[in-house]
Image (tube, coloured by chain):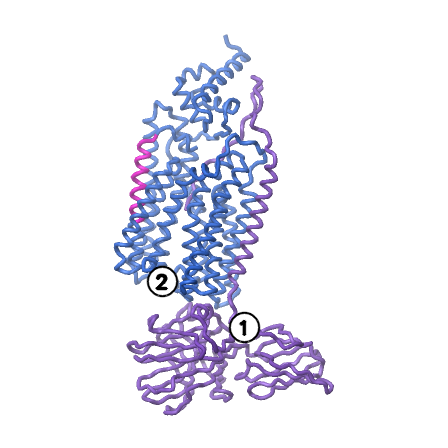
Chain colours: A purple, B blue
Amino acid sequence: MIIAPEPRLEPAPAPYAATGQGRDRRRRRRRGASRQAGLWRLEMTLGAVVLVALTVVLTTWPSQVPARPMPPGLALAHSGLVVDEPFDRAVPDGTLLDSYVFNGSAHPGVGWVAGTAHGLEVGVHPHPGWQGWFAVTLHSAPAATVWHAVVHRPAGTSEKPVEAVLAVQSASTQHNGTIDYVVVSSLTVHGRSTWQVGSAHGVVADAVTRFLWRQPLRRRAAVTQAVTLRTDGRHDLEVWFGDRLVYRSTTLDMHDPPPFQAYLEVQAEGRPYVAGFTDFWVTADAPVTVRGLAPGSRLVLSTGDGPVRAVADAGGVAELHVPPPVLSGTGTLVVTRDGASRRYAGLHYAGGDVIVAG
Amino acid sequence: MTTAAFDTGGRELGFHVAARTVVGRCPAPLNAFEVAVILETCGYTATRARSLGAQSLPDLAQHVFDLVPLYASSVEREAAEPVSVKATAPGLVDLARGFAYSSPWLVSLATLLIAGVSFWSSDVAIPSIANTVTLATAVALLVTGPFIQAFGRRASFYIGLDDQGMVVRITRLTLELGLAATLAACLVVFAGRDLLGAGTPATTRLGIAAGVSIAALQLGLAAFYVRRAFLAIGVVVLTGAGALLLLVARAGSYVDPTMLVVWQIRLVALMAAVCWVMSAWWLLRVPPTDHAPLWRPSWSALGRAVAPYALYGVAFFSLVVLPQLVSCGVLEGRYSFNPVFAMTSGTALVVLVPLLAQTVASTERLVVQQLPAWLTQFTVGEVGGFRERVRQYWRSQLAMLLGLGVVTAAAVLVVAPTLGAKVPLLADLGHYPGLLAASVAGYLLLGTGLFAAQLLFSLSAPMRPLAAGGAGCAALAVGSLATIGFGPTVSATAGLVCGAAAYAVTAVLLARDAFAHADLTYYRTL
């Protein structure tokens, strides 16, 4: 838009000495003008500051990690948790869209997502051909991260192939269209089901999956599976079902550039299908660090996978190496020193956390 | 019987008599040109001017105008430097100044491309954010347009009068009120979307922040344009763009698109804040003479004076923004970002760059150099020659504009689709040659209409551009509604082409008429 301003005008002329005419009588000072102008300038400056502050407040994005109150005597100095979504209550679509993008090969309306009390449900309505829908995390996480979700598939069988999928994919897909990911999925076809692990590469819709591990197709395959995986995107991949390590390799050739996003996904051939996801968390692949301890203190953290022990070093720092399947959870921390114990119940811990005691 | 002393006194006396005569007819002449016209209508000729000691009638007018403040209420002065009376085409410096006018949005587009931000293209990572930011931009442009036009027209006038009080008043009436209006509009739009379930909590807040920040920057830059502070504009805009690019570079190979958008909006807000502070403490500060003005208009009078400019601002920005809203399905009762239309129309927008530069160059040269030169040369009795000069200038500038436009349009149509292989954001452009061609034609017409409208504004004829803008909006509505059955993309493109065509044709015809009937009252524009 162009503004055509009026030209600047020159000040009034000097008086005419020869005729004795005096100075322009309007050239007298107006009382209070400078003060009013100064106030206006302060008003504009204050407004500018308010504008910036308001913008920062309004653009602060909601966290996918709820506040974690620590037991008395402990303080959370640094959180390693990236995502913590139990999906144990209904969540409006709008709220979900602040953390996930819904998309897929199916048309909007055919693919759908709902946050229910039974989990995050991702599904497709009846459609032609092989189509799918997913909820992908808005934010990404680096390679040194553990990903976990409990994946539910419908108990029934299907003759046509259907899949419930947890995939960890390079976030660069959104920029260059390349699809590089590792995947854990439940496949059902010809009335039988299986769980499988794979690695895929491709561009946009042409990804080719190489299966690295799979169970045989069975009529009674697990309907629900707690899946935990860890990968560096290049050579390493570990997958746990529950607390059981089902696949591990350090010699893969994957070329999946970090950071990664999680895809909670469903695919189906022709028929409607739905997959459910609960207890979805993503956390740093790092020990839980406790600081501020007396040197030599003994720590025991009870997790869902048994106790984890550590001893504080000379600097009063202890590192609890929690197994990946339970790297985020709630447990009880007991700190013992010279026969005296202090118990911290209800501690919500996660890999990468730095907790300060005392 | 002439002595030096007597001659001086006699000449001065004659000038004072002429000044009283002029003031009797016109209590507040704007400049020496107006004084010359009044003197001529009162019977003063070149011969009589020489008999009073002046070299010519314009010279007499200048002396008389200097005396007017002693007898009347005018404080305005004019400072027309003598220049060649021959109409000359704008040079490279004029064009460079024209490009400088466009620097904020040119830098914005370049930054978006370099940063890989996708609102301008088909590559949309997060639809909810794309919807929010594009809608916020549309709201901000539509609401601020009228306020910016009104401010641009009146602020420099009061700056010229050294009236800080009126500068404050016009700033409050236009820029500050414009920001408040944008905030209200954003609250209504985004809270409404939230209530209807079309938005999300975070994007509702983001939309309000984006709308207000963009509006604040638009309004904040207005004072820079009025003061022609191009260097300062460049510093502010390039610093902001540099900060964003630094952020992108430090983020590594992958940039979180949500964080990028958030930081973009925060940077826009920061740039806007800097602009407002600079405006208050520097650009809108007038010399501390603080003289009491004889006439200070009421709020309502001020509103009436700026209304035509404000309404034109509404019409022009409607032509720019409404096609985007139509493309997103507003006519179907929804808003979802249309990447195809955004990509084709965004690419076609490049056509406007040289057209805007030529428009600014032509307008500046006309107002600053040509009109003062012609008004010095011609008297009321010689209006025929004056009209011939004005018509010549209009035709030559229009021809140059169209030439520039056609060359640029051809370049965009040929080159842009080939960039798809190298620029991922434009990857799909080659699939839509028809839409691209139509959008290019639309912006070519829009630029032509803008050129004619700005020249009319430079002649202080706001009603004609307003009529052109109104015709354009009506045609846009008809074009979009008539083609709604073909889908929102076609409907939006048809609306853009029809609206821009009606705007251009009307503005060019009205400008041709205005220049054909030129008279010496154009001194009022100076």
Tell me where residue B81 appears, x and y as whole percent. 46, 30
Q: Which residues are magenta?
A: B499-518
Tell me where residue B162 appears, x and y as whole percent. 54, 35
Establish if B83 lies above or below A36. Answer: above
Establish if B275 lies above or below B256. Answer: above
Element type at mark 1 = loop
Q: Quadrant of residue B432?
A: bottom left
Give the camera-side residue of A50 and A71.
Answer: A71
Tell me where residue A150 appears, x and y as whole percent. 46, 82
Q: Identify the mark at residue A181; answer none if there is no mark.
A: none
Tell me where residue B230 appears, x and y as whole percent. 49, 45
Element type at mark 2 = helix
Give the camera-side residue of A281 and A348.
Answer: A348
Query: Residue flagged by tag 1: what amino acid is it?
Result: Pro
Q: Quadrant of residue A287?
A: bottom right
Establish if A23 lies above or below B52. Answer: below
Residue tagged 2:
B420
Residue tagged 1:
A66
Q: Is the C terminus of chain A in the top left, top right, bottom left or bottom right quadrant?
A: bottom right
Q: Quadrant of residue B512?
A: top left
Q: Is residue B516 magenta?
A: yes
- In-image side of B338 versus A277 (left or right): left
- In-image side of B274 versus B499 (left or right): right
* Foreground disc of the pair 1, 2: 1
| Chain label for disc 2 | B
Query: Residue flagged by tag 2: what amino acid is it?
Result: Gly
